[in-house]
Image (cartoon, coloured by chain):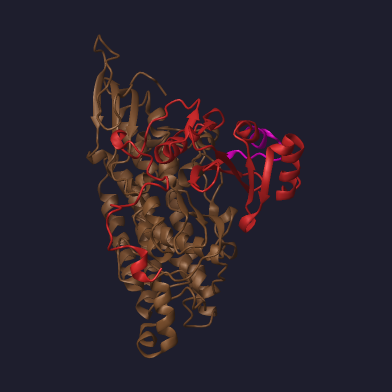
Amino acid sequence: MSKSITRISHNAPVLEDNDPQEDLVTLNIGPTHPATHGVFQNVVQIDGERIVSGVSTIGYIHRAFEKIAEHRPFYQITPLTDRLNYCSSPINNMGWHMTVEKLLDIEIPKRVQYMRVIVMELARIADHIICNGILGVDTGAFSGFLYVMQEREFIYEIYEEICGARLTTNIGRIGGFERDFNDVAFAKIREFLVRFPPVLKEFQELFDRNRIFIERTSNVAAVTPEEALDYSWSGPILRATGIDYDVRAHSPYCSYEEFDFEVPVGTNGDVYDRFMVRNEEMWQSMRIIEQALDKIDKEPKGIFHADVPDFYLPPKEQVYTSMEALIYHFKIVMGEWDAPKNEVYHAVEGANGELGFYLISDGGRTPYRLHFRRPSFINYQMFAPMSSGMLISDAIINMSSLNVIAGELDA
Amino acid sequence: MDKLTNETVIEKLKSQFGDGITHISEPKGLLTVETHKDHIIEVLRSIKEDDSMQFIYLTDITAVHHPEREKPYAVVYHVHSLVHNVRIRIKVFLEKENPTIASATVLWNGANWMERETYDFFGIIFEGHPDLRRILNMDELGVFPMRKEYPLEDPNRVDKKDFYFGR
């Protein structure tokens, strides 16, 4: 990274005058700029349209989730995880539930695991739809985005059917789900499996072999596997460089080892490869959902949570009528149960990469320390160094292919 | 290639660093060791570059504050051997006054922001870091907010005290 920009203050973008001849122009992109898809700033020095050097400033929507989490009982932390990567909240929710279940040694029934897999893969599709659709918009192709956006809306309808919420879903509870998927939900998931493939196919036909798109994205921001590992990249952008690291395959959670799916990899690590990897991942997610539906059919009906009354809220009608349920309800809501002392690291494959939860419990009702390993945060740090020498327009599509989500970036 | 297990990692680390590696445990199967801040870069380098281990992927760097300890700050490294699919957690405890530790940016560029975040929230100084500034908080904050002594909200507020809830 070029050292020519030295910022005097972190949150005041004043630059030292290192260019007395004024050959270069200093440009603020952001904090709010349509090209950045979120609240973050890049101050770049440009020579014509070419970026000479740049500095990223992040933290505009930092909400201190790690600090808040130290003061909340475990079940109240789920809504915080919603707001990390808000394009695929269910993955964050499930990751958090699984972390706590690992701490508490709760065994989850198979049917619930498959239900979770369905929700997580739907979320992955919704996230990739956004990323690839927006990449199309940034390269000047608006219609593809609108085609797939309708399907994302349909995924949100499925969320609504499952949990009542759309964006910040708060799906599930520690120990399972708050309620079973109803018949409409299952019907909608099946309908999605039928209606999405033609749309995705159409979307891909618009882009995959489109000469304008290829020339716009191919060999733009190409990253070697060594660089990607050096910067701790994970997720689709790492796989686009050719490294087949996928948490679902490497350290399977939630019974992913039972599913038959492929981990697509790219060769160049450029924007085009990232686009292709994400598209292929959507196809693989569809395969996984299909298998999960079949597996659910073979499991006994009506199971939607583990039998752990100490940690899982009893049904409301029992709370109003039975003493025992009332006691459990009270104990759980007031956080009157002690978690075991231990430390846990649990990672799930988020839509952007390895989403890790590092949880230390000292036995209280709240975590002693909770750290989120946020893929966007770690992936994004290479953006400024890799932008030097790039055209502004290339840097912008590079950013959209990194799929940086401000909520996850800033926690 | 032989499969790498936690035992072989311990063995190799022990043979190389002897008493430099302490407090070996495996909470939930994840090998956790402690080392001294003088050794941390050597330890990280040896597990990264040893052909039989290849912990080439730096998953995460963060810190934990244990105010009751003599050395209250723990810097925690999660490193992953993608080749053998084994993870290791390395902890280094730092003293209360002026907690400093060598920067891992000499081994991984990706350590840059992780260390900046750790500095921002815990005030751990990473020596040799190319650009150790705050990253998520504003410069004028003046405190390191994830340390336990800084309250989440106004400490004078009484309506949320635990004793109202029988605790």
Q: Exactly how many numbered labels are in the figure?
A: 0
Which residue occupies the extreme bottom position in the image? Answer: A321
**Residue A101 horizontal/vertical position (percent):** 52, 66
Above or below, A394 relative to B163: above
Q: Is residue B53 magenta?
A: yes
Chain identifier for the brown-coloured part of the image: A
Above or below, A284 relative to B14: below
**Residue A75 horizontal/vertical position (percent):** 41, 66
Residue at the spot x=69%, y=37% of the render? B20
Q: Which span is picked out in magenta?
A: B45-57
Quarter where residue A214 is shown: top left
B167 or B41, nearer to the observer: B167
Quadrant where the N terminus of chain A is found in the figure: top left
**Residue B45 horizontal/vertical position (percent):** 63, 32
Above or below, B67 relative to B37: below
B167 or A410, nearer to the observer: B167
Q: On the rendered structure, is A233 left or right of B7? A: left
**Residue B50 horizontal/vertical position (percent):** 70, 35
Quarter where residue A26 is shown: top left
Name the tint of chain B in the rendering: red
Residue at the spot x=29%, y=34% of the render? B140
Q: Is residue B131 magenta?
A: no
Residue at the spot x=33%, y=69% of the render? B164
Residue at the spot x=34%, y=26% of the render? A54
Which residue occupies the extreme top position in the image? Answer: A21
